[in-house]
Amino acid sequence: MRKNIASSSAISRRLLLTAAGAASLGAALTACGGGGSDSKSTSSKPVSQADIDKAMKTPTELTFWTWVPNIEQEIALFEKKYPAIKIKAVNAGQGVPEYTKLRTALKAGSGAPDMVQIEYQAIPTFTITDSLLDLRPYGASALKSQFVDWTWGQVSGSNGELWAIPQDTGPMGMLYRKDIFDKHGIEVPKTWDEFAEAARKLHKADPNVYLTNLAANQVAAWHGLLWQAGAKPYVTSGKSDITVSVDDAVSKKLGAFWGGLAQEGVIGVEPDFTDSWYAALNKGKYATWMTGAWGPAFLSGSAKDTSGKWRAAPMPQWDASKPSAGNWGGSTTAVIRSTKNPIAAAEFAKFLNSDPESAKMFATKQFFFPATKALLADASFIGDTPAFYGGQKVNEVFAGISDEVNPSFQWPPFLDQVATDWTETVGRSLARKTDTVDALGGWQTRITTFAKSQGFTVKAAP
Amino acid sequence: MAKHLARPRSAGPLFIAPFMALFLLLFLAPLGYAAYLSLFQEKLVGGTSFVGLDNYVTALKDPQLREGVIRVATFFVIQVPLMLLLALLFALALDSGLLRLSRVIRLGIFVPYAVPSVVATLMWGYLYGPDFGPFAQLSDKLSLPAPHFLTDSWMLGSLANIVTWEFVGYNMIILYAALRTIPQDLYEAAALDGAGAWRIAWSIKLPALRPALTLTLLFSVIGSFQLFNEPNLLLKIVPDVIDSSYTANLYAYTLAFTSQQINYAAAVSFLLGLLIVIISYAFLLTANRRRPA
């Protein structure tokens, strides 16, 4: 007995140390960050063809962080053309998890890859820290005419820098359940007014069905809707000036529209890409899904039970005489500034996305929606007639939408924060059916406060 | 003689050297570095500057941090007694030898601990689902209103249920192991004195369990205040109920990896660590004082 008790106090002391250690784990995690940006000065002088030829014949190993499945097929094409260069593809997670790892590696000053898969919206987040290589000196500007205009705008900096090469895109359209529309006599809505009417009518006719779901956690969809409506929520000029206007007239129009439908209870507002959401799509709880051009392939894999019932159409318009579209998703290949082999890395980024064979492979093997004009006009691509969509030429629909994407939309240099703030203000108002227009003001305030605390000069919306 | 004594003296430090090296490398160095980091502020525009204790001052006044700490404290007060009581009951029942299939039951209760907390949370998140979760489906079949496990008022309880499910077996094993170390002759002596099963449990087993209970409680203090995985995963299902600062640990993570305020995150983590040490120590002091001399 006594012995037991005596050992307890020894245990206790040890435990306390463990407690301190365990408690500091959070602190230790954050300790991997370091100060100082050791941006290597890179000349903006064009690299000569002789230098390029020499670099492409020098045995080199490059690391490429990417989440694209089976990208080894495309890499093999590059390695066949340049046998001296070996590409090591590493899956460091898709999207935010990858960016978090990249940020940590960049801060630590080692472990960062040479090239990286990066979404359009994340580019400013990395250019603000001088982490990406301007690809102009490596002849990338010559590719401009091959790519869809608005994608080129997305990868270009405010002083004309070229931060990445587009790989795939996500112009937003509307996937809809033809069977549900037919059953309730609903026409495909051409305008948002018609859409709202259809939402009310459908939910009244069948209380278990909603016209659509606006996910309360999906800031990317909101940005796509803003984009379509012609909003310019973030405008940066120079390095430290930013204009934030996420509660201007256009935003308020969107807030009143979607917040109103949510409050009426005629649309769903559940988080997307969850088990419950997948089940809802499979069981016909939602009659449409507003999504990027990658959506059709994605849906045919995740809602197999509903094959043949879906069709694609452009999103409803605010002004039917001036059709316009937004974008959700898509990614690019960027070169990390700290690479020791900038020429080979830049050549890889160019080849991967602009070589006709490689670009086509992305469209046919990975079902990426292309960023090159050639593929968007390619008969074999736009002529595809998937059974999941009842033989409709879905790619053709989205290729048409791609032409209407507004080219001047910009992203803020701290998107992660903006996204979290959206979920906790606007997204929350949708989920709780409170005033969404009011919540836009809260979002604006939170972004402004954060930007100021990070040293930005924040200008009021004009 | 002197030469003879010198040997063990020089061998001692050698034996603890590996521990000290690891301790220094894995605990003190990161801690020191985090402390160092917490004294600076790095901005996206303008770079890094020394700010002294500013980050700590901000943290002490930060309402989001305060709410997170209060929330985990509430969680601790509700969940831990329930979990330990359950673990204690299971341990006593198994130790009584009256249960059939006691090995199978013991394993069954312990198995959830072997399930990673991420998997456990995903599983419970699905079970809780208001649309297609089995509880919702069942109440739908019975024409009853669906239970709302994932709302504001239920969330702490739903989290407590997950954590209890995960850790009851673990705590039970510690308590059960402690019970098995009690010498059998104590029971025989008690039985001779006419004590029944309840009396033996109350007067012999419970006092003997005190050190083990202290241990499980300390683990629970640490676990509760570091609550992270469960809310972080449920956040994806109900972003309007759980926000990015729902628990103090989640807040520190958000600051570091979403807001890119690594220095402030270091300060918050440090304060949280300090709080855990203080609570653990205060708890140990009381436990030791109550101990019969």
Image (cartoon, coloured by chain):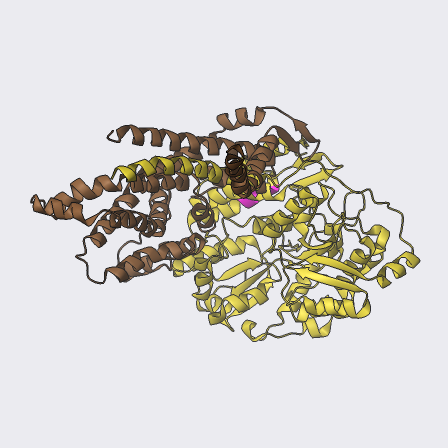
Which chain gets the brown colouring?
Answer: B
Residue furthest left as drawn: B194
Identify the image quadrant of the N terminus of chain A. Answer: top left
**In the image shown, does A173 or B217 lie closer to the viewer?**
B217
Magenta segment includes A261? no
Q: Is residue A253 rendered magenta in the image?
A: yes
For the point 25% across and 46% down, the residue is B88
Query: In front: A96, or B281?
Result: B281
Residue at figure coordinates x 70%, y 75% from the top left: A380
State the residue in front, B123 or A407. Answer: B123
- Residue A225 sits above or below residue A240 on the image: below
Residue B162 position, x and y percent, is: 36, 50
The magenta stretch is A250-255
Q: How would you classify the magenta stretch by its main secondary structure? A: helix
Relative to residue A215, is residue B250 depicted above or below? above
Residue A68 lies in what quarter of the image? bottom right
User: Which shade of the palette goes to chain A?
Assistant: yellow
